[in-house]
Amino acid sequence: MPSLKDLKNRIASVQSTRKITSAMKMVAASKLRRAQEQAESSRPYAERMDRMLESLASDILGKGAESHGLPKLITGSGADKVQLLLVVTSDRGLCGGFNSTIVRETRRIIRANEAEGKTTKLLCVGRKGRDQLRRDYGSMIIHYFEDIGRPRLSFADARTISNKVLELFDAGEFDVAHVVYNKFKSVIAQVVTLQQLVPLAPPKPKDDVIGGDALKVSIEFEPEEQVILADLLPRNLAFQIFRSLLESAASEQGARMAAMDNATRNAGEMIQKLTLNYNRTRQAVITKELIEIISGAEAL
Amino acid sequence: MMSEKIEFELVSPEELLISRPVDMVVVPGGEGYYGVLAGHIPMITTVRPGAIATYEGSQVTDRIFVSGGFAEVTGERVTVLVEGALKVSSLDRAKVEQEIKNFGEDVEDAKTEDERKTAAHNLGIAQAKLIAIQDAASTH
């Protein structure tokens, strides 16, 4: 049985742990708010980018015959032998299952690729994912980025990554690229999402756009579509990566907040149990001392 | 004549920078400057580094330097997608000239083709900045 002093020390240490976790929870909450705002403010660009791509794609597809002149980023290299996977995780731990779920999905994809006889190459964003994958799949990691988005996620970060992806693609290092990241659904729910980056699936022209067709037909392009598309696609790639980084950043803070909330609650329960234990022990000690005194007196 | 306004939107990946109705927008298109009034035919163009000017009547209200992007024009709206934008009035001429000099040296010192390309790209942007400053100065 632990002594009174031991129990007291344990209570004090659990109390200070609880203070730390509840502070971390609050920090995560405020960072989450910022991350959400940032994700929110990138939405206008996303909508307009999609609209432009759609106009371009429907125009080019409408002409049909010219489609072989399309940039490789949209048509792909014609093979799917080498798969590139961009794994977005966090640099910091203490965020529950945030990184593990990503790593689990990555392993699943790698095994699926192996079963189909495809090669996988990994591009890791974030220290945690790389550390977990390095043991089993170290040879597949061709490059990794860390300290992305600190102190604040900027578009330049996404461009650094997309430049690397483009460089690899131009060098023929891979055929198909995906990104796997945590999509922010709510504070308690993050959804592991796999999204294809290269080749870019052209957005399907919506048939039900009101009065859209009449407008679309008459759009003018300057310079011609192919040139715009060749310029637009790399930027779109950078933007898609930017979006996934934003989602991942918000998810990370959400996951950390939930994890720290749990930890705080756990610490609270533990303190209660320990205090109960402490009081019982204290009473037992008093009783024991009394018995000793009384039996000593009786013996006289 | 000029009563009809056109909605001007300047969007970067990080935020919606400007969204307001103006009389006319002059955009540095990939194949030359063009002005957009309400009722323009729909078109999509590239944007090269340069200054976008917005007009109220015949007065320039804003000059915004952009480092390149895309513009989508419809009858009611001009949407410019850029990666970064600055007010021309916030550009410092001495600094820009220094940039031109630095990037010019970079182009000459570049060892690899990639380095040279990056430096040349930056030089182009810096030169466009200078032109934007000069334009703003000469029309005022």
Image (tube, coloured by chain):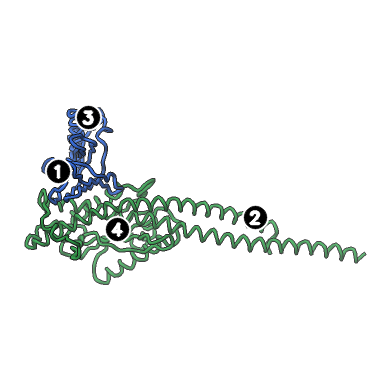
Chain colours: A green, B blue
A203, B6: nearer the viewer:
B6
The part of the image, by quadrant, that contains residue A52 is bottom left
The residue singled out by tag 3 in the image is B97
Which chain letter goes with mark 3?
Answer: B
Q: Using the numbered discs, state the Cα–Cα distance from disc 4 to disc 1 in whole angstroms.
A: 34 Å
Q: Which mark is residue A76?
A: none
Give the CA separation, mark 4 to mark 3: 40 Å
Is residue B105 visible in this depiction of the protein? no
The chain under label 4 reads A
Q: Which residue is mark 1?
A: B29
Residue on which disc 4 sits:
A86
Q: Secondary structure at mark 1?
A: strand
Residue sitting at 17 percent across and 44 percent down?
A: B47
Residue A228 % position (x, y): 14, 51
Mark before the other along the chain sequence, 4 or 2: 2
Mark 4 or 3, closer to the camera:
3
Vertical placement of A286 versus B130: above or below?
below
Give the CA separation, mark 1 to mark 3: 24 Å
* Label 4 in the same subunit as label 1: no
Residue corresponding to mark 2: A9
Q: Disc 1 residue type?
A: Gly
Please identify the quarter of the rendering in which residue A237 is found. Answer: bottom left
**Spatial CA span between label 2 and label 1:** 71 Å
Residue A79 image offset from top left, x and y in percent: 17, 65
Asked if labels 4 and 2 share a chain, the reply is: yes
Q: Are marks 2 and 1 in contact (CB under 8 Å)?
A: no
Query: Is label 1 in contact with label 3 (beta carbons under 8 Å)?
Result: no
Give the Cα distance between marks 3 and 2: 66 Å
Element under label 4? Answer: strand
